[in-house]
Image (cartoon, rainbow, N blue to C red):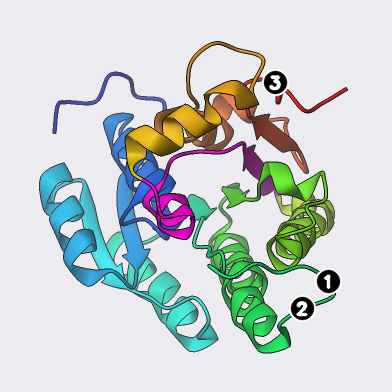
Amino acid sequence: MASHASNKLDGKVAIITGGASGIGEETARRLAYHGAYVVIADIQDEKGHNLAASIGSHRCTYIHCDVTDEQQVKSLVESTLQLNGHLDILFSNAGMMNNAKQDILGFDIPAFESLFAVNVRGTAACVKHGARAMVAGGIKGSIICTTSLMASIGNENRVDYVMSKHAVLGLVRSASRQLGAYGIRVNCVSPGAVATPLLRGVLGVSEEESERMFESSSSLKGVLKAKHVADAVVFLASEEAEFINGHNLAVDGGWAGMG
């Protein structure tokens, strides 16, 4: 891991859920690059440990956490405080997408409930316990949630996923109103289609195939990558965004379906 390029996050401690791969992995690297100490939380233990080792033990650690279990989320935050004394940044990024089509006529309720347990209940647990730690420690921190382009539109074949991302956006807008009184900023990033392992697995395509599929989805030339989303998270986590609260930051290249 190269020495960090700036001191914009020096002394900050960050938790990233879903941090072992995809957007979470890239964000872990970027936060560490800018000086933060990063706690990677995931259920992908081998990937998480390997990523933490590649970043360096002086800058990063891995903790197993299933966000559907609130007690594990609480323990994650407590362990972070025991290791580092404070929590400044929480990136609630863990999420899932069902492989099966979810239209309203064939809506699978158990599949919907499993997805909501991760995407909505898990995010709410992370925001709750992260915010409690910040309030108790007098930390004017930054909480960032991963939503999606889908938080602003509908989709006939991903009804449960669309519902979950609308719910996270509502959580962010509501939490930001309460936590702003403590100097805690709550925002979200809404990526367009990124060729992450999660999305590639759902689509059953390679990284190259998925990038070709998504290339025409924005008004900019090129392909949206995890690093673009990670840089947006770094911005929201930093003092450069000190008066941004309750905001949904679209990172979609100017989605071509708009307008």
Dot 3: element: loop
Q: Is label 3 in contact with label 1 (beta carbons under 8 Å)?
A: no
Amino acid identity at mark 3: Gly
**216 to 186, vertically: above or below:** above
The quarter of the displayed image where residue 42 is located = bottom left
State how far apart marks 1 and 2 are (Cα): 5 Å
Q: Residue at x 69, y 33 (%)?
A: 249
Q: Which mark is residue 107?
A: 2
Which residue corresponds to mark 3?
A: 254
**86 to 12, vertically: above or below:** below
Q: Residue at x 48, y 79 (%)?
A: 74
Q: Is label 1 in contact with label 2 (beta carbons under 8 Å)?
A: yes
**167 to 105, vertically: above or below:** above
| Closer to the camera in the image, 227 or 225 | 225
State how far apart marks 3 and 1 are (Cα): 28 Å
Percent from the top left, x then y, of residue 187? Answer: 68, 44
Marks 3 and 1, the one that precedes in the sequence: 1
Amino acid identity at mark 1: Ile
Which residue corresponds to mark 1?
A: 104
Q: Is residue 175 left or right of residue 19?
A: right
**112 to 133, vertically: above or below:** below
| Magenta region, residue range | 183-205
Q: Return the residue found at the far right.
A: 259
